[in-house]
Amino acid sequence: MNAIIRLVMVGVVMGGTALVVYWRVSESDLRNAMLEMEAIQQEMEQRLEAREAMIERLSRVRRLAHITVTDQQVAPNGEVIRTDLLFIELDDDGGELARQTFTLPGDVLFIDAWSVKFDHEDVADGHPLRGRTLVLLRRIYSDRMPPIDGYLIDVPGAVPAGYASGEHAEFEKRVWEHFWTLATDASAAAAMGVRVAQGEAVYKPVRPGRTYELIVDADGGMSLLPLPVATADADG
């Protein structure tokens, strides 16, 4: 009888020990699984944040200038004879760099520029030198005058004042000095991470009293957009 009791007690003890061991192992596995899930969640959140940051950099818009139509002379038949403009060039923070006035025949405004677009990956990663499209504003003219007779805005081959400093300025200077080489020599362009180097122009009819905003996408080209009247009034 005592032997049976001892066997039962041994069995109970062994069973209890097994349960304790099993519980400890299960608790450890559960803790490890939870830590692994937390690590996976953290990694997913980091990837999502990185993706959102890349999308933001690719879709970023930079203002280049505000153009206000200060006056227009109109013939009795309704034809616009001339347009007077106030051209305010802007820095990256929207501050004024310089202002110029122009008088153009007609009412269809053209603005042409040199633009240099870099590899999408450099823009998405926020590369310190190649993280955005570079633009050198060249000329302003109308559809009633040859482009070659247009008025100069920035000096070709130079870095516009206020646009860059230090290493950025040296890089942009090299870009503008060798612009047409980058535009026509694929190997030279690839060596500087340039995807596209080209001249481009935006144009549209403009109306008196309105202000238009010249913008450039971080990964794209220029656009000329009319500002809402309230915004234009506030800027004026």
Image: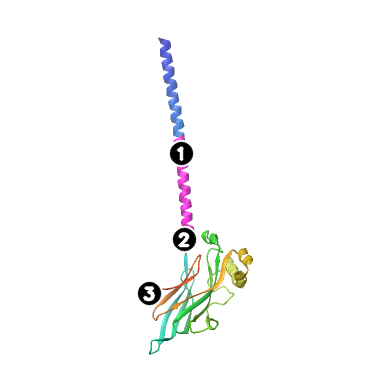
* Residue depicted at 48% across the width and 55% down the height: 51
Closest to the observer: 124 or 98?
A: 124
Question: Which image quarter holds the C terminus?
Answer: bottom left
- Left or right: where does residue 230 sit relative to residue 199? left
- In the picture of the structure, the residue carrying the numbered disc 3 is 234
Specify start and end residues of the magenta stretch as a single range.
29-56
Query: In whole angstroms, how far apart are the C-alphas of marks 3 and 2?
Result: 28 Å
Q: Residues within 10 Å of mark 2 (few under 14, many from 20)?
A: few
- Left or right: where does residue 178 sit relative to residue 33? right
- In the picture of the structure, the residue carrying the numbered disc 1 is 33
Mark found first going from the N terminus, 1 or 2: 1
* Residue depicted at 46% across the width and 49% down the height: 44
Closest to the observer: 218 or 92?
A: 218
Mark found first going from the N terminus, 3 or 2: 2
* Residue depicted at 46% across the width and 35% down the height: 29
- Left or right: where does residue 154 sit relative to residue 11? right
